[in-house]
């Protein structure tokens, strides 16, 4: 169980529900604390640090919660299962799995037991999207009666997703001062979201080095000082920070999921009059969580960014999306201007939110707001330094395989594209007014084969036994449960519903607009060959993410 300790000063009054509600806006469900302990003062060591050994054990019990007993047969069956798994005396209809001790690895164990008890395949994602006993039981009943498609399907998404495609009628191009050519070619002030993320950090570096603009970077922070510290920390993490960057950056404390991006009306108006162009990389991404949990940052956030884009004068908005919104498009290769209404099988909350975001951008375009949609694949590290993200799916598989000393025999491809190419291409596209309102697939023309990845790892000296995907996955889950290794647990949770043993059908994507925009500009996508792969591995060894190979 996760326990949070809260030092509550005299005169302060806050409830467990208030703390939990606040925590739920900052943390994914599986990371929420189970217990909350209020204290007048934390016990301290002689050095002034918190004395963890003398923190009291939580005394809160389930009896202190409002208890609504299970009603349906499914609820009663699940309540017993939850109580046994979570080691709690009883479970009520409105109890949340992740509030009473559940986490990602227990979610996997729950899913295995549920599939056995109900003799039916149940997606592990169900518990992340329907986390109370009542909603989880309802989801299982729907699946048993009508199949998985009753809960996870294009049809169920279609029932409400069009209602989500709305834009405040006051957000429009009409009446605003039009964008000038200089706003594209020589912007003096650029607004950037997502700069504390991997791609956004590299794009911030490119903006500083390749333009003369001041970069106004939105950061979730209490003030500009804390925001600047977050930006510096992110760029230092990827070894791209330079002291001279600081004079070119203005940290803007705020958030995507609140009106006016969390700014005061006057500050928002002033920002709207200063900014020349906007690059919107910011997003909440958790592939195990539902659309509703992505909606704030990824849908509400789009509306507020468009509000800024149309405040005082028009500013070209470059919206970063994902090629995953094209899932199910039958036309091959899928054109950049494909009608995404034809997309099917969007069962991922993050992708659904980006789909809605794109449709809102289309609304804005129809109202005269200049917008470009740039769809990205999965993004790999810098092709020169090797610096890259540790949370990417491929590298999680690599890390787990090295820990297990075995790799899956899969006919799987990846469309990884180096971040330096992504950033250079987006910046080049943004300079030409002629490309505004056009969609782009900013992708590599090449594909990476997992079999090559595992072969290269063996040639680097890593002992890897190639086994069937089923055996590899079974070993992964068993070791995750037995060792409690967070690295294995994270991937095991993600892989719960995956079957990579079947050959993958690569969705071909057209990038005609991209080729035209980059023609004769000297910007080419590096191929991820054995040499570049080794550069990535060397970087991850330096950070400690991957172990050193045998000499």
Image: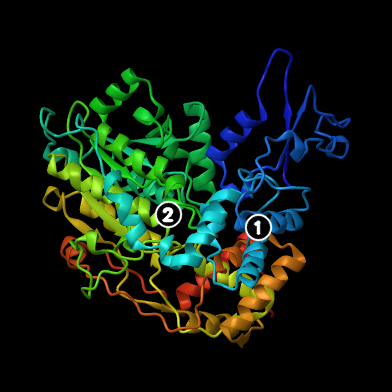
- Give the camera-side residue of 15 and 389: 15
Residue 547 in view in this figure: yes
What kind of element bears circle 1?
Answer: helix
Q: Nearer the viewer, residue 151 or 263?
A: 151
Asked if residue 188 can be seen in this view, the reply is no
Q: Is residue 266 above or below residue 276?
A: above
Q: Residue at x 52, y 55 (%)?
A: 138
Give the residue number, with chain letter if any, for mark 1.
78
The mark total stands at 2
Image: 141 above or below 266: below
From the viewer's perspective, tell me whether residue 504 is left or right of residue 66: left
Q: Is residue 272 left or right of residue 351?
A: left
Against 161, is 14 above or below? above
Q: Is residue 116 left or right of residue 272?
A: right
**Residue depicted at x 23% and y 38%:** 187
- The residue to which callout 2 is attached is 349
Classify mark 2: helix, strand or loop.
helix
On the image, which quarter does residue 166 sit in?
A: top left
Q: Residue 342, how many percent across, how many down? A: 23, 64
Query: How far from the left and from the top, in percent, is residue 230?
Result: 52, 38
Q: Nearer the viewer, residue 253 or 25?
A: 25
Q: Earlier in the sequence, mark 1 or mark 2?
A: 1
> Within the image, what quadrant is residue 419 found in?
bottom left
Residue at x 38% of width, y 63% of height: 153
Disc nearest the viewer among 1 and 2: 1
How far apart are the two marked residues, 1 and 2, measured between alpha carbons? Answer: 25 Å
**Residue lying at 37% horizontally and 74% vertically, measured from the top left:** 527
Please tell me whether residue 455 is drawn above or below residue 226 in the rendered image.
below
Residue 332 image point, x, y percent: 22, 75
């Amino acid at each position: 169980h996760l326990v949070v300790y809260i030092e509550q000063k005299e005169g302060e009054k806050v409830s467990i529900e208030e703390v939990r509600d606040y925590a739920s806006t900052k943390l994914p469900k599986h990371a929420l604390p189970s217990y909350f302990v209020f204290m007048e003062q934390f016990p301290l060591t002689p050095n002034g640090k918190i004395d963890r050994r003398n923190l009291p054990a939580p005394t809160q019990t389930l009896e202190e919660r409002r208890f609504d007993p299970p009603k349906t047969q499914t609820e009663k069956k699940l309540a017993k299962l939850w109580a046994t798994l979570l080691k709690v005396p009883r479970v009520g209809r409105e109890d949340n799995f992740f509030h009473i001790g559940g986490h990602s690895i227990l979610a996997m164990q729950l899913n295995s037991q549920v599939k056995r008890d109900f003799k039916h395949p149940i997606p592990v994602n169900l518990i992340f999207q329907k986390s109370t006993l009542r909603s989880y039981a309802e989801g299982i009943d729907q699946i048993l009666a009508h199949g998985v498609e009753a809960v996870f399907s294009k049809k169920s998404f279609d029932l409400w997703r069009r209602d989500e495609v709305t834009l405040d009628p006051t957000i429009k191009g009409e009446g605003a001062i039009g964008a000038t050519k200089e706003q594209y070619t020589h912007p003096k002030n650029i607004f950037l979201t997502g700069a504390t993320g991997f791609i956004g950090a590299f794009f911030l570096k490119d903006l500083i080095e390749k333009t003369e603009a001041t970069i106004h970077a939105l950061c979730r922070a209490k003030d500009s000082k804390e925001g600047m510290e977050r930006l510096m920390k992110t760029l230092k993490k990827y070894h791209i920070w330079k002291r001279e960057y600081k004079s070119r950056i203005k940290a803007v404390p705020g958030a995507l999921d609140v009106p006016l991006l969390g700014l005061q009306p006057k500050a928002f108006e002033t920002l709207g009059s200063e900014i020349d162009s906007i690059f919107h990389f910011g997003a909440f991404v958790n592939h195990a969580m539902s659309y509703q949990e992505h909606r704030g940052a990824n849908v509400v956030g789009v509306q507020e960014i468009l509000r800024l884009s149309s405040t005082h004068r028009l500013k070209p908005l470059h919206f970063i999306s994902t090629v995953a919104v094209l899932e199910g498009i039958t036309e091959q290769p899928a054109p950049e201007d494909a009608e995404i209404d034809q997309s099917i099988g969007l069962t991922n909350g993050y992708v659904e939110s980006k789909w809605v975001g794109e449709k809102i951008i289309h609304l804005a375009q129809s109202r005269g707001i200049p917008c470009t949609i740039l769809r990205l694949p999965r993004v790999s590290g810098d092709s020169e330094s090797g610096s890259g993200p540790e949370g990417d799916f491929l590298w999680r598989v690599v890390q787990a395989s090295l820990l297990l000393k075995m790799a899956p025999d899969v006919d799987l491809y990846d469309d990884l594209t180096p971040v330096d190419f992504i950033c250079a291409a987006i910046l080049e596209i943004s300079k030409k007014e002629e490309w505004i309102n056009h969609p782009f697939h900013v992708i590599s023309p090449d594909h990476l084969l997992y079999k090559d990845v595992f072969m290269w790892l063996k040639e680097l000296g890593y002992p890897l036994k190639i086994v069937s995907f089923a055996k590899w996955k079974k070993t992964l889950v068993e070791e995750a449960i037995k060792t409690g290794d967070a690295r294995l647990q994270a991937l095991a949770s993600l892989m719960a519903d995956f079957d990579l043993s079947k050959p993958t059908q690569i969705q071909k994507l057209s990038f005609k607009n991209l080729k035209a925009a980059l023609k004769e500009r000297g910007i080419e996508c590096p191929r991820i060959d054995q040499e570049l792969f080794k550069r990535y591995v060397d970087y991850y060894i330096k950070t400690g993410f991957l172990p050193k190979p045998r000499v």
